[in-house]
Image (tube, helix red, strand yellow):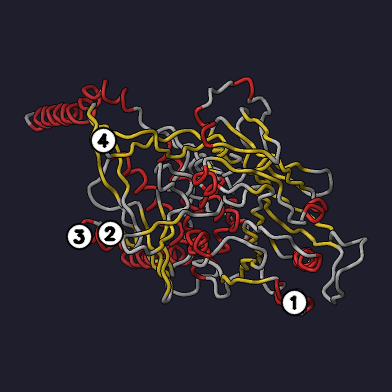
Amino acid sequence: MMNKNVKNSVFLMLCLIVLNFINQSFYKRFDLTQDKRYTLSETTNSVLSKINKRLYITVYLEGDFPSEFKRLQVETRQYLEELSAENTNIKINFEAPDEQREELIKRGMLPSKLTVEEAGKLSEAIIFPWAEISFEKKSTLVSLLPNTIVASQDEQLQKAIENLEYSFSNAMHSITQKKQKRVAVITGNGELQDMYQYNLLSEVVKKYRLAKFTLDSVATNPQQTLKDLTSFNLAIIAKPTQKFTAQEKFTLDQFIANGGKTLWMLDNVQADQDSLFANGKMLAYPRDLNLTDLLFSYGVRINTSLIKDLYAAKISLATGKIGNQTQFQNLDWFYHPLVRGNPDHAITKNIVPVRLRFANQIDTLKNNIKKTPLLVSSLLTKKIGTPNFIELQSIADKVVETDYNDGNQLFAVLLEGDFNSAYKNRIKPFETPLYKKNAIQNKMVVISDGDVGKNQILKDDESKIQPFDLNRDKWTNQEFGNKDFLLNTIDYLLDDIGLLQLRNKTLKIKILDKQKAFKERTLWQFLNVILPLIVLFVFGFVFNYLRRKKYTK
């Protein structure tokens, strides 16, 4: 009998050891949510597979903040646990920002002010919805509450949770990249000066190698210029004002034919807002950049008419004086369309409206290139032919809505596919061994406004020039989505693994009905607090009664 017990005990111990070994060797988490929100995409798994050293993620969603935003904290923690379970090199830490708020602000982590409704009362709370990723000697920030188009704070919370995978995967991919892709900012044809592109390019340089590239050298050594340009992955052409020569056009064409991505920000009409404010009126006239045939071969044409849109940004104008104080008023300026992005594309999903200034209309042409509209006007538009005088005083004209009946106008388009060279059946301006007739699976974005990436300038008391935030107007304080749109565009053009597609992720998150919860709070307090005590009391009473009855016999 004793031997049998020993054998059973030994067998049981061996079984436990084997089970423990299996448990340690084979680890699996199961996602039982309906929308599979904790199931990592192939793109994210690809990013994680390349992290072979310690990567630290510090999240500043800890401490006392609104209960509804505890949801964001919980969802963030659970998502990061999935990352850590997939790759043990990822270490997670949640910290309260209370004692380091000033330091966090200096490092670019600006707080968010929230309106909180509790017990039927409204109050304000400040949170720091940020995470910091550190890898080797590099670090980067992740915003957990991105600026999006939302109708309510609950919707903002949902968008933030949907954006978690993209935000962290994008940041991890960027910080662990050993070889950064190269971006050329084209100069030589009167493009925007550095100070007007600073706010955008200072963000681009955080992820990519950035360099100015002049096309002036084409005149003396075109073959070498083309060879040098093809070493870049993307070319940004921001508001050129001077004609492109045949050799310069051919250089850009062959850059594209050799696989280079391009971001065009073009004005086909000369319209200077500084001149308008200085003189009260200006002459808007067509600008010949000599790019029409080049763009035509890719399937687009930028027209020379200006678009007025009743859904427009505001400008600040002096409307009078009270004593010695000039009074300013923010008025709708229909030449500055405020356009919404395509909600079905990763570049423009959830971005706030983008401000354009004296924008032209784009026509698309039939060819084998896939064309996806990115920025489109409202229905209430009016085309203004050029040349034409534009007067500032027209802002006071009475609006006749029936005059604005030209419908939606296209301002930005994504082109994807096999681009034929514009010089396929033409005489080439110069010979080069790099010549190709077409590009295989290339991408470009064409925007019919050169000012879409132009930031304003501030002058301090010492007359020092400082670039202003591209997403904000310094006079009206309106917020726009220009910088987010352009950064997403650059990321998409340079994205080889489908990271930006994670922005299309949609989750079904059930949000608490606050009004219903407030009305029924007494019932739920009873069910959650009083009823368990009653059940416990009844159970104890019955248990004692039965126990006494049993042992008194």
Marked residue nearer the N-terminal end (2 or 4): 2
- Whether tag 3 and tag 1 are in contact, CB under 8 A, the answer is no
Can I make out residue 339 in this image? no
Which label is found at residue 95? 2
Q: In which quarter of the image is the N terminus?
A: bottom left
Q: What element carries label 1?
A: helix
Q: Residue at x 43, y 32 (%)?
A: 151
| Label 3: which secondary element | helix
Residue identifier under label 1 = 227
Query: To which residue does mark 4 refer?
Result: 323
User: Which amino acid type is shown beneath numbered disc 2?
Assistant: Glu
The amino acid sitting under disc 3 is Glu
Q: Can residue 491 be seen in this view?
A: yes
Write down the quadrant of residue 441 in the picture. bottom right
Which element carries disc 2, helix, strand or loop? loop
| Residue 491 as seen in the image, left or right of residue 172 | right
For residue 99, the mark is 3
Q: As shown in the figure, which amino acid type bears the numbered disc 1?
A: Lys
Label 4: element kind:
loop
